[in-house]
Image (cartoon, helix red, strand yellow):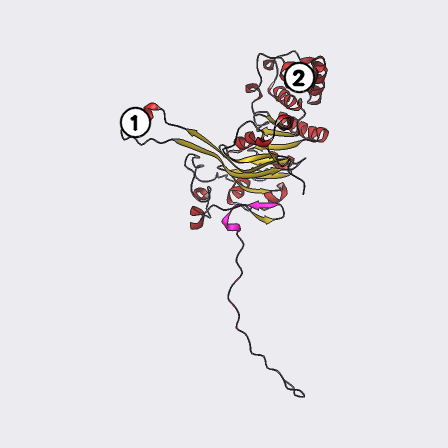
Amino acid sequence: MTTPLIEAVSVSRRFSRKLDYAEKIARALGANLQDRTVHAVDDVDLSVMPGEVVGLVGESGCGKSTLGRMMAGIMPVSDGEVRWKGNALPLLEGAEKRAARLAAQMIFQDPMSTLNPRKRVIDLIGEAPRVHGLVARREIRDYVADITSRVGLDPSYLDRYPHQFSGGQRQRIGIARALAVRPELLVCDESVAALDVSIQAQILNLFMDLKQEFGLTYLFISHDLGVVKHICDRVVVMYLGRIVESAAPDELFAEPRHPYTQALIRELPEIGDRKRAFTPIRGEIPSPLHPPAGCHFHPRCPMAFDRCRVERPRLQATGPGHVSACHLNDPIPAPTTTLPVQPVTIAKKGTDL
């Protein structure tokens, strides 16, 4: 089998807030105060193969953006490790480490918050390739002009500032900045969520064109199931820091195996459902400060039973390329009752039975 381009192995991420001095004094005097720990990502395994487009979906607060940042190398892991082409990132050194860092780039939801308003487009896009020695200083303008033309921007705009562009144009600048260091993997974190529908379609088409042109691999983070259904090779569903299901889009949308995935897909609006009353998933997503024991989804699951409250379900295959973490998908054990043995009569030679 081909080695994954990038792989998260038993990755967890926790954010802790310690009590300050005054709170420690209050606790010593009897106040019920404790250190706070947010379990953003909880023991996740995820691999992305070269050339693959993987969609990562889930409700807001489920940890998908945190997982994407860890896989892009922007955020350290609390437990586990991220591997690039089979090698653990912390063990890489020198040129190999720098190459791995440049090979995974991230595109964010709000480009205006990630673009320095004091810098021109040529500086925003050309700084990283110049600093890392990918392009000589005298060739920067021609290089940036080529990149911007590939993402659909007029090269004559290189001396403008971010505030002089529309939202769709700023997103193209963010894409061009990521492409400027010649990456192999793009982690797109809700990169079309803030755009108009028509502009969304243009950016999605651009992503697919760039994939063919540069041989890119995508980890596409989104809450829009309709988008990932049409552009992804595989869809991974995440809930409260854990992956609960993964499959090819056609398989996932036709036969979802996890109750959470079933609820998400059931409420997708369709043209023929004009008279249908849409009902959200009951209850609210639990706090990652105190996640439930067992299956994290059991407080909201209509099919939960006693085992769900105490035992965490493991991801297991439910079909070719389809895995799900639900006790309802456990194989039914074969019956252990043995049938009574019937006596056999052996006929003597020359007689009939």
Callout 1: SS: helix
Determine whether 341 is above or below 23 in the image.
below
Determine whether 340 is above or below 113 in the image.
below
Q: Main secondary structure of the magenta part?
A: loop
Quarter holding residue 322: top right
Q: CA distance from mark 1 to mark 2?
A: 53 Å
> Of the residues shown, which amino acid type is indicated by label 2?
Arg
Determine whether 168 is above or below 236 in the image.
above
Residue 3 on image: x %, y %: 65, 39
Determine whether 148 is above or below 296 in the image.
above
Q: Is residue 42 visible?
A: yes
Which residue corresponds to mark 2? Answer: 130
Q: Earlier in the sequence, mark 1 or mark 2?
A: 1
Q: Is residue 305 visible?
A: no
Residue placed at 38% from the left, 31% from the top? 35
Quarter holding residue 4: top right
Residue 122 on image: x %, y %: 65, 14
Which residue corresponds to mark 1? Answer: 26
Q: Which residues are magenta?
A: 321-340
Residue placed at 44% from the left, 32% from the top? 38
> Of the residues shown, which amino acid type is indicated by label 1?
Ala
Looking at the picture, tell me which residue is in the foreground, 45 or 278: 45
Callout 2: SS: helix
- Asked whether the residues under the numbered discs 1 and 2 touch, taking CB atoms below 8 Å apart as contact, a structural biologist would say no
